[in-house]
Image (cartoon, rainbow, N blue to C red):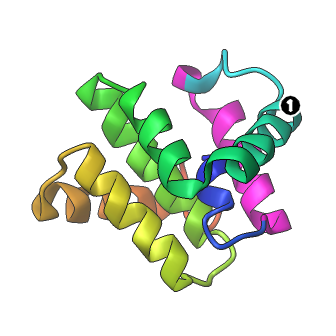
Amino acid sequence: MVLAAWADGHVEGTEALAIQKLVQGLPELSGVGPISEIARETRVLLQDLGMEACLMGAASSVTDRTLQELTYQCCARVLSSDSLFASEEQEFLKKLQELFKLSNDDMRRLLVLAAPGLHGGPPIR
């Protein structure tokens, strides 16, 4: 999610807040650690490796299909939290869809399921 927030080159406050809410609201994310530390590490990796390599590395570490879908939904929620969808953010989700081998039907279903919570609604399920 932190990597998604960096997709357009900067992190908006609404994106950081969305990440925090997701981490606090989803039991699957309870052990991720301090978000600020993850954000610093992500920024360093982005500077060293670039977005493509970071995204490929992060996606390859998520092998469980259920977690892949949850990851996609969370990233979509973070990217839409500022009500803007920059071309880089759209490209990020498209690449994540490809890396997770999600069909277009899967992608649409996951975006619909993520949508109720985009503006403070219930947690993703």
Which residue is farthest front?
48
Look at 78% across and 64% down and name the residue there.
11
Q: Residue, x 30% and y 23% (percent of image)? A: 63
Q: Is residue 85 left or right of residue 44?
A: left
* Front residue of 5 and 118: 5
Q: Nearer the viewer, residue 24 or 82?
A: 82
State which quarter of the image contains the C terminus: top left
Q: How many marks?
A: 1
Which residues are drawn in magenta?
11-28
Q: Residue 32 placed where, x, y %?
A: 68, 22
Q: Is residue 125 visible?
A: no
Relative to 50, say whether 10 is above or below.
below
Side (left or right) of 97 relative to 89: left
Q: Answer whether residue 24 is magenta in the image.
A: yes
Amino acid on which disc 1 is placed: Glu
Position of 4 relative to 88 (above/below) = above
* Closer-to-camera residue (101/16): 101
95 w.r.t. 84: above or below: above
Q: Position of residue 80 (x, y in %)?
A: 57, 71
Task: Name the residue carrying label 1.
Answer: 37
Residue 114: give x, y in percent of width and height: 42, 57
Front residue of 80 and 49: 49
**Residue 55: image location, x then y, percent:** 49, 47
Q: Is residue 96 magenta?
A: no
Q: Quadrant of residue 78?
A: bottom right
Dot 1, crowdedness within 10 Å: few (<14), some or many (≥20)?
few
The kind of secondary structure element at disc 1 is: helix
Residue at position x 54%, y 49% in the image: 122
